Image (spheres, rainbow, N blue to C red):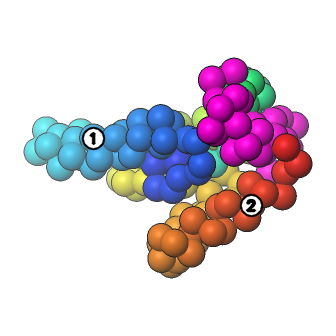
Amino acid sequence: MSSIGGKMYEPLGAWYHATKFAVEGLSDSLRIELKPHGIDVSIIEPSGTESEWGAISGDSLLATSGHGPYMDQAKVVAAALASTVGSTMSTPPEVIADAIVHAATSPRPKTRYPVGKGARAILLLRRLLPDRAFDIVIWKIYQRFPA
């Protein structure tokens, strides 16, 4: 179980993205290692999922980084995270569960399942844009949220 966060990044999310990048690399290696044993490895890469995660992570971000040199960024990012709760851009968990069941029961599963609202578009944008252009796009998205 990974996330589109294993292929892209966001401000003040290094801890999260590092874990998801690691899951991507681990899964890719395991796919090759386990193939001779008849074991398939698929990576589920959901986009934002309907849950309270945004509010919880935003609160934690403000508690740890809401004062000091990261204060301004933390307020912007926390506001963006909080906006995901109840958002029409969030994907119902059942959609993610369906992808997991499909990957687990398919006779020839895909190696990756980007799933959820905007997942494919974000991953395509990440592949097409140079790093610095993607940096600008990400920060512009976050700046839409009032701190």
Query: Residue 115: which numbered mark, if any?
Result: none
Give the label, 1 or 2, closer to the camera: 2
Q: CA distance from mark 1 to mark 2?
A: 30 Å
| Quarter-of-image position of residue 51 | top right
Q: Is residue 14 left or right of residue 108?
A: right
Magenta range is: 63-89
* Residue indicated by mark 1: 26
The amino acid pointed to by label 2 is: Ile
The amino acid pointed to by label 1 is: Leu
Q: Say which quadrant the C terminus sits in.
A: top right
Residue 81 forms part of the magenta stretch: yes
Marks 1 and 2, the one that precedes in the sequence: 1
* Residue indicated by mark 2: 141
Where is residue 5 shown, x and y percent of the image? 52, 48
Where is residue 74 shown, x and y percent of the image? 70, 38
* Observer-nearest of 93 and 108: 93
x 84%, y 58%: residue? 144
Q: Is residue 81 left or right of residue 26?
A: right
x 60%, y 48%: residue? 11
Where is residue 101 shown, x and y percent of the image? 53, 37
